[in-house]
Amino acid sequence: MVVVVISSPPSSLSPFLLQVRNSRTFVCTSIRSSSSSSSLMDEHPRRVVVCGGGVIGVCTAYFLAKKGACVTLVEKSSVACAASGKAGGFLALDWCDGGLVSALARASFDLHRSLAQELDGPQSYGYRPLTTLSLSITESPDPPSGSKPSGNSNIVPGWVDGRIRSSRTIGTLETTAQVHPQLFTRTLITKAVESYGVEVVIGKLESVEVEGGRVRSVVLEGGRVIDSDAVVLALGPWSCKLELLSSLFRVYGLKAHSIVLEPKETDAITPHALFLSYYPSQGGNPLDPEVYPRPTGEVYVCGMSAEAEVPDDPEQIAGNPESIQVLKRVARTVSSHLGEGEAQVKAEQACFLPCTDDGVPVIGEVPGIQKCYVATGHSCWGILNGPATGAAMAELVLDGHASIVDLSGFSPARFVGSKKALV
């Protein structure tokens, strides 16, 4: 066995990462792989470096370490500092049906349920099933009157007292659920560190070193080299910043805005996720914001998305004031409980969702580089599909193939020879 000692972290780390980096010394046990090429791995635990501390990277690190790998997670800023900390955390069983992502989404929805049982998800990170509604609503200059909405009003919860045109149920307690994404991601990395020996390193990835067509190490800013038997690049929208990936396919950032509100009467807000067709008072095409009450008593409102340049530093991301104001109008139009004076604004924020040109995530081994893998491009379904992506990546890296879901359609090899995919 190999003993991995977590070194003393710099004082600039967040309290969360100070905790996970200072926790203890870990022992990594040997891997038992079904792959025919696993004899060397049985003697020497495989060293895997996962680059990216969002939900995809954390889930990958978790399942790799749970299968016996010695895992180092490299993150530039802090775990779940970007979209994985600022997303809505909405989960759906069958909303991806009919497309390539269907099997991945269904497997991941079930894994979320299993993880919630394992990690006490309801208490640890707000996991809960919830009813999901589609509402058509008209903006009004006046506060909500509390009058009876039109349409199928018996399904609309009492706290939604805006001018509802129509309503229908699009998700049930069996098919839709939610997590608090930041708490979920950080709960998972804490478990990975404390129980499975994952080491978290704060540093910027500079390059992936390749020798003889096979990955050998990663190099961080400042010159630190981390030797590895395999590397997983889970860089989200920052995949476009690494030439190794951007020379093969395009990942662009969709900038999405959100606000987090804390109403005075938290008990009045029931667990109903709302997907809106929102008609502005000045006319024009309807918007499609979303509203997610959380078990914490907060209400998350998001929308106003557009492609934008991804900054180098995730800490530099700020919301556009105009978009934030629109979301505040949406909130007070939907419910008198969410208007000015009735709810405190806890956060005004934005994040970048990693998107691909064909709308399909990129998951698999990088063509031409053995043991170098990528997992990115999950768009708005990153939180949903994180667990199954991580579990599949762990199988692919350690066993040579994934059994939880067929990854062939997600392979980055689909971009080889496609000039259109290049940046």
Image: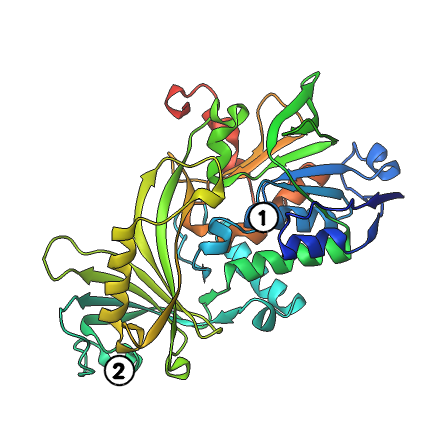
Q: Position of residue 322 (x, y in %)?
A: 25, 52
Residue 78 disc label? 1
Q: Is residue 236 visible in this depiction of the protein?
A: yes
Figure quadrant of residue 57: top right
Residue 66 appearing in the image: no
Q: Position of residue 329 (x, y in %)?
A: 23, 64
* Residue at image coords 23%, 80%: 153
Q: Quadrant of the N terminus?
A: top right
Q: Is residue 219 above or below residue 193?
A: above
Q: Residue at x 50, y 63 (%)?
A: 180
Amino acid type assigned to the residue bearing label 2 in the image: Asn
Res 154 label: 2
- Work out whether residue 157 or residue 53 is closer to the camera in this orientation and state it: 53
Q: Quadrant of residue 267?
A: bottom left
Question: What's under tag 1, amino acid-wise?
Answer: Ser
Relative image position of residue 356 (x, y in whole percent): 41, 36
Q: Give the mark, 2 or 1, whose residue is nearer the N terminus.
A: 1
Residue furthest to the front: 11
Position above or below: 311 against 137: above
- Residue at the (26%, 82%) spot, across then down: 154
Q: Nearer the viewer, mark 2 or mark 1?
A: 1
CB under 8 Å between callouts 2 and 1? no
| The furthest residue to the top | 212
Q: Is residue 117 above or below residue 308?
A: below
